[in-house]
Amino acid sequence: MTVGPVEQGETIAAIATAVVPQQGSVSIVRLSGVSAVAIARQLFHAPGQQVWESHRILYGHVRQPQTHQVIDEALLLLMYGPRSYTREDVVEFHCHGGIMAVQQVLQHCLAAGARLAQPGEFTLRAFLNGRLDLTQAESVADLVGAQSPQAAQSALVGIQGHLAQAIRQLRQACLSVLAEVEARIDFEDDLPPLDEGAVKDQLEDVLTQVRQILATANQGELLRSGLKVAIVGRPNVGKSSLLNAWSRCDRAIVTDLPGTTRDVVESRLVVGGVPIQVLDTAGIREASDQVEQLGVRRSQAAARAADLVLLTLDATEGWTAADQTLYSLVKDRPLIVVINKVDLQPEPMALPIKSVSTVQTAAAQHQGIEALEAAICDHLHQGGLAADLDLAINQRQAAALTRAEMALLQVKSTIADQLPLDFWTIDLRSAIAALGEITGDDLTESVLDQIFSRFCIGK
């Protein structure tokens, strides 16, 4: 997608809701642009004396303009600019759900002069027209893709502009310092000497706040992508039973035969407000069967890539040499030991490893799941990954903040080395540009392409 100023003559249209056969009661076709209302008047017949005015919902029928054949019974929502999402005239056809009706309405909108919107183009127009800053636009995408209530709440904080406000305050502080420095360069004889100590204090305060916001990057990534948890263990220790009990459904086949699970089975859950991707891996052992060997290799790869490993043991068999081998494989990963089948072994199981979080379960009886989730929440809090934060930045924002941090550190080094004021301004401008990139105040077209291409068509 090539991004530039919004073409005033173009009206865009797209289906703004998911299209699923035989599901969903309502589908929406959205138009934005100078011709949106005119196109709606061509297609929509509102009986009686209904008034076409902003922020009013009209009832009627979508009709083929030439033959007047009825396409659908629908509602029409009118939002005249600038009181709309894009600050342009926006209309929405609220049609019956499914496939045919909504697609026919869209096709007639395109035939009437609209252009099919590109991914994220409605939100892009909202950004280019000053309705949203870039952090708010990204938060819109985060809200659409939120996998947990906490992720949704974090996205709403971003939409409300909290991150943009913090970043703009830091950028303004850097601009103030730059103005003071440049004034001394241009009018050295007319102004008192620069207060170097005050400049250092200002920059140190900005640097501290930049680092505080940067510290939320892991939280942001966790809320957006989720925690990847791998259930690892010998064959037949109850890994699949644990997954089924945890997900409250039969995600994995369970038998008494070792090696039943041949591949990685995935389930998605929410624990403590954080999305969790749980991977039930094939039992890791020496296998002669080629298919099982492939499953074992995939299990080992999943364990190495996981954010948290649940090393599952069989309480009836105790700690075995095979368990020790598995522990050697995963001991460098964040780890919780799950002692399963405790209902079949009343005696406590002794472990040769220390300082490891341990949970006892009887997965076949659906026991111990609450304790397991509590242990995972403890892991998240100990790692500072589940704190209640007002800000949770994404990877792009973290990269820009890191550049700002490095530029500010370079300014401090320049001051310490007693270099001329001209050198101070170079890195100050770099820091200002990096901060401006976060909110969209200082941005390149390629960055906009990268951001909005990830949006769905109708957003």
Image (cartoon, helix red, strand yellow):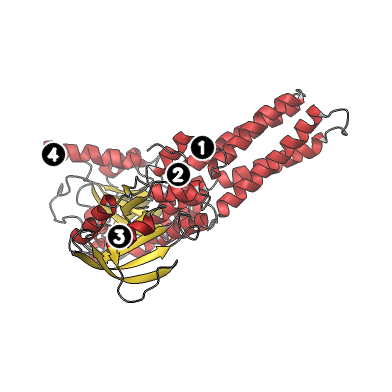
Tell me the element at label 4: helix
Q: Residues within 10 Å of mark 2 (few under 14, many from 20)?
A: some
State the separation of the CA atoms marked 2 and 3. Answer: 24 Å
Q: Earlier in the sequence, mark 2 or mark 3?
A: 2
Q: Residue at x 65, y 44 (%)?
A: 170
- Side of 70 where 201 appears, left or right: right
The residue pinned by badge 1 equals: 399
Res. 202 image quadrant: top right
Please report contact status of discs 3 and 1: CB closer than 8 Å, yes or no: no
Mark 2 or 3, closer to the camera: 3
Tell me, for residue 291, which label it has, or none: 4
Label 4 neighbour load within 10 Å: few <14, some 14-19, many 20+: few
Dot 1 surroundings within 10 Å: few (below 14), some, or many (20 or more)? some
Are discs 4 and 2 less than 8 Å apart at CB? no
Mark 4 / mark 3, whichever is N-terminal? 3
- Left-right relation of 402 to 194: left
Contact? badges 1 and 2 (CB < 8 Å): no
Instruction: Give the residue at mark 3.
Output: 42
Q: Which amino acid lies under the numbered mark 4 shown in the image of this protein?
A: Val
Q: Secondary structure at mark 1?
A: helix
Identified by mark 1, the residue type is Ala
Q: Is 315 rendered above or below residue 26?
A: above
**Where, by quadrant of the figure, is residue 1 drawn?**
top left
Q: Judge depth for marks 3 and 1 and give the one in front.
A: 3
Label pair 1/4, CB-CB below 8 angstroms: no
Where is residue 294? Give x, y as percent: 18, 37
From mark 1 to mark 4, how far is it between C-alphas? 42 Å
In the image, what residue type sits under mark 2?
A: Val
The residue indicated by pointer 2 is: 6
Residue type at mark 3?
Gln
